[in-house]
Image (cartoon, rainbow, N blue to C red):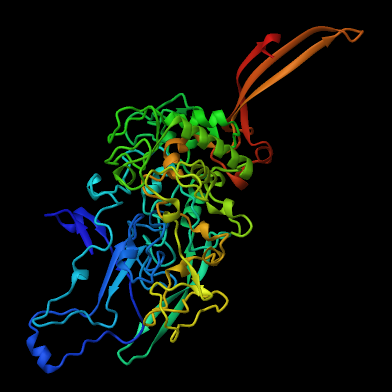
């Protein structure tokens, strides 16, 4: 399926393509409708056999209204972290593990035994074929924003790696652009439900349903590797790459004003060489993420103040962290979580929110630090959910954002949204009869497919019409389904909407200036002269500012040399330091 601009060739103006979309509702005999010859003679228009409707599961969607009365939220993919765990721009959307429909698409079916009306002359499909499932607009607002949500954009200028959150960098061993990984992967750090918290990749069994006209049916399964793609991308990118913002043509002056050139020759070709550019640039005012100074973090975050977004408001007194520059609605003083400000708008932080956030960041630094690299700061910890749930839930910055009350805190006691109830917004995938609850839950128990591992059930134990598939089976750490202590770890449905502040949104602003170590140091020295009796006759104080440079102590190696290329002297002492300032101090300055 391809979507292109009207009147254009899809090959030149293609906007969207879906190459694979898997869904199924059963593995038994194909649906049939039996009509007598007399009945058939009276029907002159098409008649339906069965209806399956799929709609993207959204926060705020009243999906229970479209399910049988005994159903609860959490079935048929009705409650998931749609914007955090799934790639809404993917081209290949498949059913992971044992799901019948591809999450996060909410599924509705009518008359699973093919009993939709077939009154002559036919064509009576019922309301199910013509209605939209739950919500006709993004979010719950019929008034503002025109039902639009801006989720991804292509930045006109890259200055920080976090802007790559808009790039579709998802993929696995089978395909690129897959639906069961986060769309805004780079810079974010929420743990994926598909992989155990202690792992960044996990081989799991995925099932394929097989049915034939002869009533025989069954499953085939294969080992599929699932990935925490955010963790892997962050590890690969944040400590190895940066954007120099050097234009491809014209003067080699960085468009990022915090980057300064070391080479006196500003036309140096090395500035455009991806291998040498870093050795010719320094950051003016780099910020060490290991800082435990709350006021320093406040000042750093407040650098996002006085930014004017095209969508408004005109004043820039609050710190702005927009998902993109293309957001079409203004932000709200207190985000609604349901209106245009939260689906087509962006987030701003007040001074009080910055203060709370800075305090939480310091707590996370003390808890998780020292950070030995930027990716260590950005990523969550790889740890077991039962031993370190908080550290493995998300990275330090995201945890600080959530716990500060800017979004919804883990336990729901702090909530930054005006119209969102933490209890109603919570994801509720469940455990039933010692297995994941079925998408189509009921009283049937016969015909359940076999699990690849009986100690780790994927299929539900009760169903309707032998539909034992379970979206709940995607949760790798199944403690989140069956243990009350860990059920909250499933998170909140609103996670990742444009009005939910993510760490990638913040890193888009500050990511070009952070470092995990300091390169500039203040050194103070004291000297004293004593006479023969040990009495002080003179005192002196001095101060030097020294700075680490890209050059090695031994000039035999170029600044770009690495590993085995280095001389023994450089392996021992590393980069060269230079004194950039020196002054004598008075006693009053000490």
The picture places residue 547, in percent across and down from the top left corner, at: 59, 27
Q: Is residue 289 at all visible to an observer of this figure?
A: no
Question: Which is more toward the observer, 541 or 377?
Answer: 377
The picture places residue 148, in percent across and down from the top left corner, at: 25, 49
Picture quarter with the N terminus: bottom left
Q: Residue furthest top?
A: 537
The quarter of the displayed image where residue 383 is located: bottom right
The picture places residue 498, in percent across and down from the top left corner, at: 36, 46
Question: Is residue 303 rendered to the left or right of residue 251?
Answer: right
Question: Which is more toward the observer, 111 or 277?
Answer: 111
Up-down relation of residue 206 to residue 278 (above or below): below
Up-down relation of residue 399 to residue 103 (above or below): above
x 15%, y 57%: residue: 9
Question: Which is more toward the observer, 160 or 384?
Answer: 384
The picture places residue 439, in percent across and down from the top left corner, at: 40, 72
Question: Is residue 462 rendered to the left or right of residue 139?
Answer: right
Q: Is residue 354 at all visible to an observer of this figure?
A: yes
Number of numbered discs on residues: 0
x 29%, y 41%: residue: 326
x 15%, y 93%: residue: 36
The quarter of the displayed image where residue 170 is located: bottom left
Q: Residue furthest front?
A: 69
């Amino acid at each position: 399926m391809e979507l292109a601009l009207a009147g254009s060739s899809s090959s030149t103006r293609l906007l969207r393509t879906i190459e694979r979309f898997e869904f199924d509702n059963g593995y038994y005999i194909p649906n049939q409708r039996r009509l007598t010859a007399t009945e058939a003679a009276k029907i002159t228009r098409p008649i339906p056999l069965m209806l399956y409707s799929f709609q993207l599961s959204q926060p705020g969607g009243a999906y229970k209204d479209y399910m049988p009365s005994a159903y609860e939220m959490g079935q048929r993919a009705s409650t998931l972290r749609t914007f955090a765990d799934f790639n809404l721009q993917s081209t290949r959307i498949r059913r992971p593990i044992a799901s019948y429909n591809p999450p996060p698409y909410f599924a509705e079916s009518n008359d699973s035994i093919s009993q939709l009306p077939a009154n002559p002359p036919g064509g009576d499909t019922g309301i199910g074929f013509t209605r939209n499932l739950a919500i006709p607009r993004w979010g719950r607002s019929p008034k503002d924003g025109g039902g639009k949500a801006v989720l991804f954009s292509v930045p006109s200028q890259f200055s920080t790696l976090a802007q790559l959150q808009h790039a579709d960098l998802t993929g696995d061993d089978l395909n690129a652009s897959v639906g069961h990984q986060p769309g805004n992967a780079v810079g974010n750090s929420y743990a994926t439900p598909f992989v155990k918290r202690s792992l960044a990749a996990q081989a799991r069994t995925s099932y394929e349903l097989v049915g034939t006209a002869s009533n025989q049916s069954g499953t085939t399964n294969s080992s599929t590797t699932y990935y925490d793609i955010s963790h892997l991308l962050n590890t690969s990118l944040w400590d190895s790459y940066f954007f120099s913002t050097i234009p491809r043509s014209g003067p080699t002056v960085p468009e990022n004003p915090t980057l300064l050139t070391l080479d006196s020759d500003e036309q140096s070709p090395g500035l455009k060489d991806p291998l040498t550019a870093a050795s010719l640039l320094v950051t003016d005012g780099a910020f060490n993420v290991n800082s435990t100074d709350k006021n320093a973090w406040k000042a750093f975050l407040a650098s996002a103040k006085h930014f004017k977004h095209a969508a408004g408001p005109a004043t820039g007194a609050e710190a702005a962290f927009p998902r993109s520059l293309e957001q079409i609605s203004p932000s709200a003083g207190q985000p609604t979580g349901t209106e245009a400000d939260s689906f087509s708008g962006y987030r701003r932080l007040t001074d009080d929110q910055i203060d709370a956030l800075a305090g939480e960041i310091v707590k996370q630094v003390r808890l998780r630090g020292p950070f030995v690299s930027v990716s260590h700061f950005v990523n969550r910890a790889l740890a077991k959910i039962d031993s370190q749930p908080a550290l493995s839930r998300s990275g330090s910055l995201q945890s600080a954002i959530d716990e500060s009350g800017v979004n919804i805190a883990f336990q729901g006691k702090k909530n930054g949204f005006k119209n969102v109830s933490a209890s109603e917004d919570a994801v509720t995938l469940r455990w039933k009869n010692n297995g994941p609850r079925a998408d189509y839950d009921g009283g049937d128990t016969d015909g359940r497919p076999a699990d690849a591992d009986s100690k780790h059930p994927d299929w539900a134990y009760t169903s309707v019409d032998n539909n034992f598939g379970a979206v709940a089976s995607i949760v790798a750490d199944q403690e989140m389904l069956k243990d009350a202590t860990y059920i909250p770890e499933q998170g909140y449905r609103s996670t990742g909407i444009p009005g939910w502040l993510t760490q990638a949104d913040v890193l888009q602003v500050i990511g070009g200036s952070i470092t995990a170590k300091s390169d500039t140091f203040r050194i103070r020295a004291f000297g004293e002269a004593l006479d023969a009796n040990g009495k002080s006759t003179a005192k002196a104080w001095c101060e030097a500012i020294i700075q680490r440079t890209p050059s090695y102590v031994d000039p035999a190696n170029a600044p770009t040399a690495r590993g085995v290329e280095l001389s023994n002297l450089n392996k021992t002492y590393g980069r060269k330091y230079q004194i950039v300032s020196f002054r004598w101090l008075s006693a009053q300055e000490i």
